[in-house]
Image (cartoon, rainbow, N blue to C red):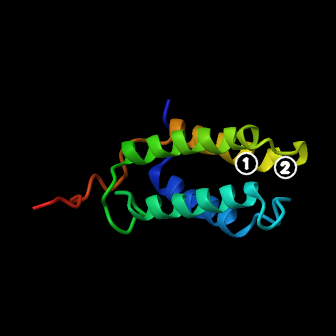
Amino acid sequence: MRFVPTRLHGAVDYLWGGLLLLGPRRLGLPPGSAEARVAQAAGAGAILYAALTDYELGLIPALNMRQHLALDVAGGAALAAAPLLLGSLPHRRAPLLGFGLFAVAAGLLTRTRPEHGPRRRLAAR
């Protein structure tokens, strides 16, 4: 059941991405650590593909919502798995695991069509 509106999802995308991009220290991740770099890369990527999504808060409609949500699920799963793959210390695991699981849930619970309907996507002509 998908009940999260795409407009709310868009606002959360930018907030979520910004927190990961700018807040590793606030999340308890040492600056320059592998976990901090993963968090920052995930945040930057999320902001980028949010801006490229055809929804209310997107800037350039290059991706449709289904593609965006697939990226959320895949990226969230990778982010949640990152602490295990990096061999992170137990106290450094929670932020990436939490943000990753949140992204998976958002990807599974958000509606696949924006309220405004699809805009004209970029097409190679």
Residue visible at 55% across and 45% down in the picture: 75
Expressed as whole percent of the image width and height from the top left, the position of residue 85 reads 71, 39
Q: Nearer the viewer, residue 83 or 43?
A: 83
Look at the numbered disc 1 and give the secondary structure of its residue: helix
Give the number of callouts.
2
Q: Nearer the viewer, residue 1 or 90?
A: 90
Residue receiving disc 1: 96
The answer to whether 92 appears left or right of 35 in the picture is right
Residue visible at 50% across and 58% down in the picture: 10
The reply to whether callout 2 and callout 1 are in contact (CB within 8 Å) is yes
The answer to whether 58 appears left or right of 107 in the picture is left
Look at the numbered disc 2 and give the secondary structure of its residue: helix
Residue receiving disc 2: 92
Residue neighbourhood size for the residue with mark 1, other residues' Cα within 10 Å, grouped as few (<14), some (14–19), many (≥20) = many
Separation of marks 2 and 1 at Cα, in angstroms: 8 Å
Residue visible at 53% across and 55% down in the picture: 8
The amino acid type, in three-letter code, at marker 1 is: Leu
Residue 21 is labelled as none
Residue neighbourhood size for the residue with mark 2, other residues' Cα within 10 Å, grouped as few (<14), some (14–19), many (≥20) = some
Q: Examine the rendered structure and indicate whether residue 108 appears above or below residue 43.
A: above
Q: Nearer the viewer, residue 56 or 62?
A: 62
The answer to whether 61 appears left or right of 77 in the picture is left
